[in-house]
Every structure is written in structure tokens, then in C-alpha cells.
Image (cartoon, helix red, strand yellow):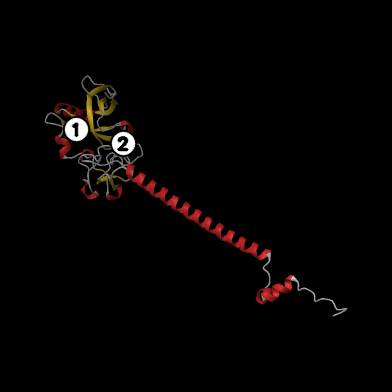
Amino acid sequence: MTGSSPPAAPSVPDMAATLHPRRSRLPRRSSRSRSSRRGGARRSLRSFLTAARWHQRLLAAGLVAAATAAGLAAVAPPQVPTVPVVVAAHDLAAGAVPAVDDLRVARLPAGSAPAHAYAGPTAVPGRELLAPKRAGTPLTDLDFLDAASLARLGNHLVAAPVRIADAASLRYVRVGDRIDVLGAATVPGPGVSVGRARTVAAGVRVIAVSGSADGSGLADASGDGGLVVLAVAPATARALAGAAVTSELSLALRPSR
């Protein structure tokens, strides 16, 4: 034993390898792999939170839309029943006889439709209009000169057609106006000189206008003036008929009251 050195003590790694041979052969996990796992977990959590917020916004938008629809339904006016009414498809001139193409059917609230309006174009009588009609205006029985409208004049009045020499003046006349009919003599007679004017009928009511020369389709077919229908007493109707033979008739509008 003289001159020999004692055996060296085993090192710590050698002891670990002896005690745990398998563990010593496994590679150590680096800090980089642990960081990547933590990063992946953070990304997954971030994706989950993003999806949750998106679904939350979608749900909130749906709730707002539902609340808005419910509010509009609560304040919306109730459905009003309507009825069909015949109206003018375009502007119609006084004296025109409306054809089917001149009419259309509109639906109006039942409480706003005029009385005695026509429900269909075939119900409209083939008679002349008493006054011009604007497009979209309903037509009723009062727009036509017929037996019923004549009956409304009463027993003391008659409807007298009068031809006015200046047909263009009728563009200013409307049904219901009050006018004076003037006669300027064209034939001399006892105490009457040519051109002298006199009042033939005063303050008579217009019930129809069937001709004028304003270029709107109201011109009378004869080309000799325009025709106006007046509600007058029988004696006034006789005076108008006599004046039409010896005088040119014109009119003067009275101010409405």
C-alpha cells in the first residue's frame, strides 16, 4: 500500500447517473420551449376573448333591433280601411266626356271618400263634365249635368244654355260663380241702336261650362263662342233666348261672397 494513492471520490453527476440512469439520458427542456408554450396559451386566451366580445356585440345588436321593431310597432298608426274611388287620370277640361283611359281607381280612407263617388270607371256616366277636374280629383255625381242635378235646382229655376260670343272669357268661369249676362245689339230695333249694351240677366249662377277657346280642349264644336249653362227663372230664360237672336252676349263676373 506504500506509494499508492487512495481512489478518487465519484463526482455529483456520476452519482446522479448511477442513481438515475434513465433521467440522465433525457435532454433538458430549454427555457425557449417553455416560453413558446406560454405564448401559445396567451394566444388561445386572446382568441377566445376576441370571439366572446364579437358574439357579445352581435347579441347586443340583435337586442337593439328587436327593441326598435317593438317600439315602431307600438307607435305605428292602426290600419285604416280604404274604399275604391274613381279619380281623374289627368287634367280634364270642362265639357269633356271622360273615357275609360281618362280615369283611374285610387283607394282612399273610408272616412275621406266623397259622398256619391264612383267605385269603378264603368259607373261613370257618359256625360259632359260641369267643370274642369285636376288629376287625382275624385269624380262624383255632382260633376255631371244630369236629371238629378237639374232636379236639385227646384221648381222655380230652369237650366238655360247661353252662348257667349267671347269664348275665351269662359276660362275664368267656374261652376258656382255668379255672373251678369250682357247683350250688345247687332240688329237695330225700336229704341235699340247697334252696339248698345244692356243687362239681360243679373247675378245668375253658373251650373255648367261646356266650351271655351283657351286651347285646353274646351272649345265648342261649332266654333261660334262658348256655351255656359245658367240656373235662372223661367222669365229670365225667355229673355236670354230672345237676346241671343238680336245681340252678342258677353258676361261679367261678380265677386264671390
In the image: residue 18, left or right of residue 233 = right
Q: Are marks 1 and 2 in contact (CB under 8 Å)?
A: no
Q: Residue furthest right?
A: 3
Q: Position of residue 193 (x, y in %)?
A: 26, 21
Q: In the displayed structure, does residue 8 sit left or right of residue 123?
A: right
Task: For marks 1 and 2, give the CA distance.
Answer: 17 Å
| Extreme residue in the top direction | 191
Image position of 17 (left or right of 127): right
- At x 16% / y 36%, what residue is drawn? 150
Label 2 packing within 10 angstroms: few (<14), some (14-19), many (20+): many
- Residue at 29% x, 41% y: name it: 137
For label 1, the crowd category at 10 Å Cα-Cα, with few meaning under 14, some 14 to 19 and many 20 or more, is many
Q: Quadrant of residue 79?
A: top left
Camera sees residue 56: yes
Quadrant location of residue 148? top left
Q: Which residue is mark 2?
A: 212
Q: Which mark is residue 87?
A: none
Q: Give percent across and percent down for residue 202.
A: 22, 23
Please tell me whether residue 235 is drawn above or below residue 105 in the rendered image.
Answer: above
Query: Could you tell me which residue is drawn at 66 percent across and 76 percent down?
Result: 22
Which residue is disc 1 drawn over? 160
Q: Regarding mark 2 in the picture, which secondary structure is present there? A: loop
Measuring from the top left, give residue 208's x and y in whole percent: 24, 35
Q: Secondary structure at mark 1?
A: strand
Q: Nearer the viewer, residue 254 or 137?
A: 137
Amino acid type of the residue tagged 2 in the rendering: Ser
Query: Mark 1 vs mark 2: which is more N-terminal?
Result: 1
Residue depicted at 53% across the width and 55% down the height: 49
Residue 245 falls in which quadrant of the image?
top left
